[in-house]
Amino acid sequence: MRAHYGWSYSSDLNSAIGLRERCNQHPSGAVLGWTVDHRRRTLELLAQRLMKAEKVVLVGAAVEEDDLAKNWPSNTVFIAADGAVGACFDRVDVLCVVTDLDGGDHLDEAVARGIPLIVHAHGDNEERWRDCTEAWAEQGGASLVLTHQTDEVYPDMHNVGGFTDGDRAACFVATLGVPFARVQLVGYALDHVGPWSGVTDPERKLDKLKWMGRILDHLHEGWQDQ
């Protein structure tokens, strides 16, 4: 994908290193919940909830209100892809948000509500994560798990796979051992840009959605029928 879009590995690596250092070396990291131990505990708690859930619903950017207005099993867990968390507020409780920080005000609201963020670093979002972490620090912190897309191995930052926030959410739960038979995707579209997507070039976004489809096919060929 880097070759397809002309992105550099060094940019991805520098962003990952920078975000990790921002959290690990922040002078108020313990208060903000950003230390290695805090982030490890956040991930452990998420994994426990996911493994106990009867159903795990991944909410994508093309979600509509009717998609969420269902009689879900009582032990259903919801994970939102980036700005799609905005569709979930006051409808379903969200366990966490998988995001590269395009979600704008919806992410700020998620942080205010105490929803953990699975924050992804890549070469094109370094300015965003710097701005967001600065804002969150002023607000008192946020529960974070960090992900990246490099070949490096870190004990406290994870390469779960994926490309867009939507398919990365699926990769995230797969990495934690959740069987795909218990996963349901709502608001995942390949033929149009969803209303909960961040500001984007529609043509470029549609091209990215093709990659999302390939990754989801690799995880589970019948994902569109679940």
Image (cartoon, grey):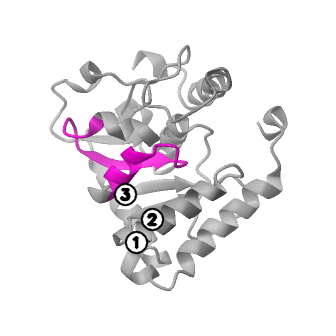
* Label 1 – label 3 distance at C-alpha: 17 Å
User: Badge 3 is on which residue?
Assistant: 116
Under mark 1, the amino acid is Glu
From the viewer's perspective, is residue 88 above or below residue 151? Answer: above
Residue 135 is marked as: 2
Q: As drawn, is 144 to the left or to the right of 89?
A: right
Front-most of residues 122 and 155: 122
Quarter occupied by residue 30: bottom left
> Element type at marker 2?
helix
Classify 10 Å Cα crowding around label 3: few (below 14), some (14-19), many (20 and above).
many
Quadrant for the N terminus in the image: top right
Mark 3 / mark 2, whichever is N-terminal: 3
Name the residue located 37 percent from the left edge and 57 percent from the top edge.
116
> Can I make out residue 55 in this image?
no
Mark 1 / mark 3, whichever is N-terminal: 3
User: Badge 1 is on which residue?
Assistant: 138
Name the residue located 29 percent from the left edge and 45 percent from the top edge.
94
Mark 3 or mark 2, which is nearer to you? Answer: 2
Q: Which residues are magenta?
A: 88-111
Quarter occupied by residue 11: bottom right
Name the residue located 41 percent from the left edge and 74 percent from the top edge.
38
* Label 3 – label 2 distance at C-alpha: 15 Å
Q: Position of residue 127 (x, y in %)?
A: 63, 57
Q: Are marks 1 and 2 in contact (CB under 8 Å)?
A: yes
> Element type at marker 1?
helix
